[in-house]
Image (tube, rainbow, N blue to C red):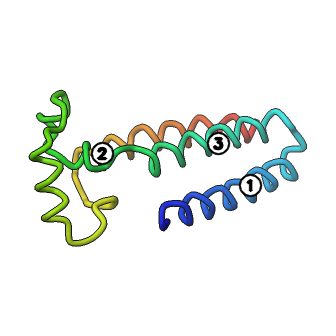
Amino acid sequence: MGDDVALRRCLVWLAMVVIIVGFYTHSFKKMVVTYFMGLAGIGGVLLPDWDFFDRDFSEWTQPVSVDEIKRSDVLRLGSTRFRFYPLRTVIYAVVYGFGLYKWWTYVRQ
């Protein structure tokens, strides 16, 4: 249920950003681009299967076994959604940084 709350909050913030971009640029096309970029960003953070990606990077090419699922359920003390992994952090920073840069240059035109 907590994931639904986070998704709703992100979508409300996205709607506010889209409205601000619309007032600032007076362009429906830029509003639509902002909306879809925001949906892609929200989807990239909230939708991935974090139990799959919380494994070591070298194991990402192999499917998750039943033993790993049971072990992770037993060992899980809290949410694993926001664990810090340097490689994942670098990948997200590069991808979202480039997307944000491209979006900003488009909106400023």
Residue 102 in the image: x percent, y percent?
59, 35
Q: Residue at x 51, y 44 (%)?
A: 43
Disc 1 secondary structure class: helix
Q: Which disc number belongs to residue 90? A: 2
* Quadrant in which the C terminus is drawn: top right
Q: If you read the primary sequence from the N terminus, does the residue marked by circle 1 or circle 3 appear first?
A: 1
Residue 73 in the image: x percent, y percent?
19, 60
What is the three-letter code of the residue carrying label 1?
Ala
Q: If you read the primary sequence from the N terminus, does the residue marked by circle 2 or circle 1 appear first?
A: 1
Q: Residue at x 76, y 37 (%)?
A: 32
The Cα–Cα distance between marks 2 and 1, rounded to whole angstroms, is: 28 Å
Q: If you read the primary sequence from the N terminus, does the residue marked by circle 3 or circle 2 appear first?
A: 2
What is the three-letter code of the residue carrying label 2?
Val
What is the three-letter code of the residue carrying label 3?
Trp
The Cα–Cα distance between marks 1 and 3, rounded to whole angstroms, is: 17 Å
Front: mark 3 or 2: 2
Q: Which residue is identified by label 3?
A: 104
Disc 2 secondary structure class: helix
Q: Which residue is identified by label 1?
A: 15
